[in-house]
Amino acid sequence: MRIDILSATPELLESPFSDSILKRAIDKKIVQIHFHNLRNYSSDKHQKIDDYQFGGGSGMVLMIEPIDNCIRELKKYNNYDEIILMTPDAILLNQKISNRLSTLKNIIIICGHYKGVDQRVRDNLITMELSIGNYVLSGGELPAVVLCDSIIRLIPGVLNNETSALTDSFQDNLLAPPVYTRPSNYNNIRVPDLLLSGDKTKIEDWREKKSIEKTNKLRPEMLDE
């Protein structure tokens, strides 16, 4: 998979891809990550990429030109399955979306910034808009990293144990059950005896029951789905 990320501040993106699972995926050549500074695609001599809103109003708006120029350049060399804008006023990212995106070959992610992006970008240049929550951040860089992490960990070969991702919360519309590790008795706080029994059938039944209980308590709307 190839992921191209368009940003006004690409330096914010570098650290998360330099460690842990994301770095491993890059080192294994399972995924390619390319950062693109929108200022390099501005025709303005000062590399300006934002301007005031027509009609007045507070806040600066990302201009269409540098975004369009960058996308046009990338499309000369690659075909893209999705061009995604990260913005708070969009549909919420969920596990089903991440599952589908993980099967694609090439995607572009545009990081929103300032007050937002020129509406013509949203109407004409992108194929999808995503939000990671009902709140506003300074830019779309952190949401872009969240999206990438949620996608890349699902690609075969990235995780050491590929079945691990299949048992994560939300994969089956349930939250994951409680998990425990050594020691089995810590300061007289014990791991449930059943998990130490070796009875796989009973353990799976216990895990399913706990998942349902946890989901019903914390996210009951998921059970309705």
Image: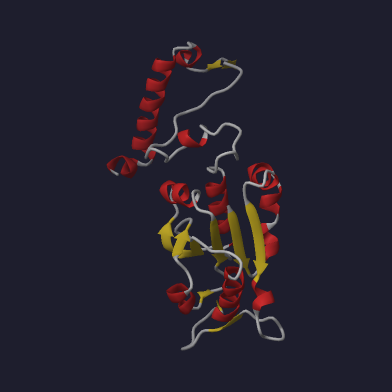
| Figure check: 2 above or below 89 | above
Q: Give left or right: position of 121 versus 211.
A: right
Q: Quadrant of residue 177?
A: top left
Q: Quadrant of residue 24?
A: top right
Residue at the bottom extreme, as displayed? 55
Q: Residue at x 45, y 54 (%)?
A: 93
Residue 199 spot, x, y in % from top left: 44, 12
Looking at the rendered image, the quarter that the C terminus falls into is top left
Q: Nearer the viewer, residue 187 or 68?
A: 68
**How are the residues colored?**
secondary structure
Q: Give left or right: position of 91 versus 225.
A: right
Q: Give left or right: position of 128 versus 43.
A: left
Q: Residue at x 56, y 43 (%)?
A: 153
| Figure check: 214 above or below 37 | above
Q: Nearer the viewer, residue 140 or 102?
A: 102
| Figure check: 71 above or below 3 | below
Q: Nearer the viewer, residue 158 or 168?
A: 158
Q: Residue at x 35, y 31 (%)?
A: 212
Residue 179 spot, x, y in % from top left: 51, 27
Residue 143 spot, x, y in % from top left: 55, 57
- Give the total of numbered labels: 0
